[in-house]
Image: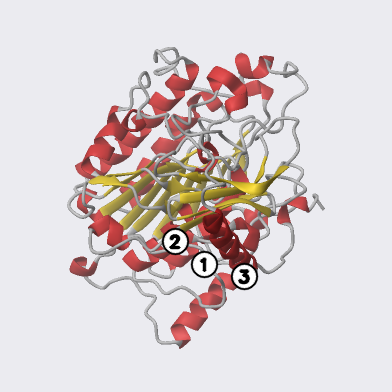
Amino acid sequence: MLNPAARCSLLILLLSGCTVSPPSSEAERLPNLIVIFCDDVGFGDIGAFGHPTIATPHLDRMAEEGQRWTNFYVGAAVCTPSRAALMTGRLPIRSGMMSSRRRVLFPDSGGGLPDEELTLAEMLKTRGYATGCFGKWHLGHLPQFLPTRHGFDSYFGIPYSNDMDRTPESPRGRVAFEQPNSEYWNVPLMRGEQVIERPANQETITRRYTEEALAFIDENVDRPFFVYLAHSMAHVPLFASESFDGKSIRGLYGDVMEEIDWSVGQILDRLRSLKIEDETLVVFTSDNGPWLVFDQQGGSAGLLRGGKGETWEGGMREPTLFWWPGRVRPGVVMDMAATMDLLPTFAQLAEAELPEDRVYDGYDLSPLLFGTGPAQRDRIFYYREEQVFAARKGPFKAHFITQSGYGSDGPAVQDPPLLYNLEHDPSEKYDLSSRHPEVIEEIMRMVEEHRNTVVPVVDQLAIPLP
């Protein structure tokens, strides 16, 4: 179901003479598109990115057969704004999905992804795609904000984070997270727009998301499809099914990651068994870095500094894989990219037109995927709430404001800004500000130019329940 804004965009495309119909023959079939989006998985949490004790054979094979991207970023260091960036191809400051009053949406929030935003699913619907969302949404839990109102034909998942709606029976403090029980969080599991289970049984949720996605693929094998598989793991509280609980030498976090790896294997194996792997692009990444305040129940950013909630690299640079046998050139890609790039890339692959009435923050990644041209992206803006805390241009990153993700410290203005060469120093250890003031000036000009493109909009995260 397309929202009114999407219908308006579709009408504009029709009137302009652009095709919006699916291809008429098998030879013209558009590619299937799958995004596997994890929660709070760090840069160093899978084998292909260097973890020594978490077994991820399916992801490792995906990396070997496809591309491993080492400079891939998200739109924010926390859930809601990061997911908005992925879905819209736009920095969340443009849609009101990033706020100085609340960092994410909660069960008592009345806002969500605005109707006028065009999502990946809505864009692909104009080209005849079947669209399915399975997992965590976190872009609004009221009916008008659910996936089914933003272009998805079907939805099976939870509308916000799995640690929300804490029950009175839940032990106080960290005990509930150290010894988690699904009954401690009254999180709804939804099918379409109906709650089918509450509280959601989180011990089986990774497996059930996977089974629903597989069924959707089976049902739509004869037409192009888009699958958004958004795991609620590895966000605390951590849960793994009986087949994985207690099996990893990394502990509970390892159990969770190894079940996610199993899920990826199930998806790739199904594509192979249906003989559509050469017609399907699969992307694996995460919404932000590891939640370090939870110690061993949080993940690892590897050699990167910081984690979830922070604008250090560990908060926003994610382990990312692209897989498309016979199409994507295998190897390691060190060029910069971001989740905002997926929408224009998918538009290119699906031969879809994008409306020209808005600013996009993404670039088409096709030249890098297929080895036909250079990267288009040379910059990253690191937002926290409504401010640009840091910015990267080429190899250099300047920090204007720093703050821990979840500590008691306030924002610290850096004057002069801290400066790091991320190609030489990805751990952000060695400040070069005194050596390269001209680089800082160049980055500051770039940030000012960017700010001039940002138009104030309604703060969706600050809207209370009606």
- Amino acid type, mark 2: Leu
The residues tagged by marks 2 and 3 sit, at their Cα atoms, a distance apart of 19 Å
- Amino acid type, mark 3: Thr
Which label was assigned to residue 360?
1
Placement of 231 over or under 245, stated as above or below: below
Q: Using residue 212 as the reference point, say whether residue 271 is left or right of it.
A: left
* Viewer-proximal residue among 447 and 222: 447
The residues tagged by marks 3 and 1 sit, at their Cα atoms, a distance apart of 10 Å
The residues tagged by marks 1 and 2 sit, at their Cα atoms, a distance apart of 9 Å
Look at the numbered discs 2 and 3 and tell me whether their residues touch, using CB distance below 8 Å.
no
Which label was assigned to residue 453?
3
Placement of 373 over or under 331, stated as above or below: below
Task: From the top left corner, tell me how far across and down residue 17 is, in percent.
Answer: 40, 87
Mark earlier in primary sequence (3, 1): 1
Q: Is residue 60 visible?
A: yes
- Amino acid type, mark 1: Tyr
Residue at 54 percent of width and 18 percent of height = 296
Tag 2 residue: 343
Residue, far front: 435
Q: Using residue 264 as the reference point, say whether residue 207 is left or right of it.
A: right
**Secondary structure of residue under mark 1:** loop
**Secondary structure of residue under mark 2:** helix
Look at the numbered discs 1 and 2 and tell me whether their residues touch, using CB distance below 8 Å.
yes
Count neighbours of disc 3 (C-alpha within 10 A) and say few if under 14, some if 14 to 19, many if 20 or more.
few
Task: From the top left corner, tell me how far across and down residue 352 is, in percent.
Answer: 39, 71
Residue at 42 percent of width and 40 percent of height = 212
Count neighbours of disc 1 (C-alpha within 10 A) and say few if under 14, some if 14 to 19, many if 20 or more.
some
Q: Nearer the viewer, mark 1 or mark 2?
A: 1
Task: From the top left corner, tell me how far across and down residue 82 is, in percent.
Answer: 56, 48
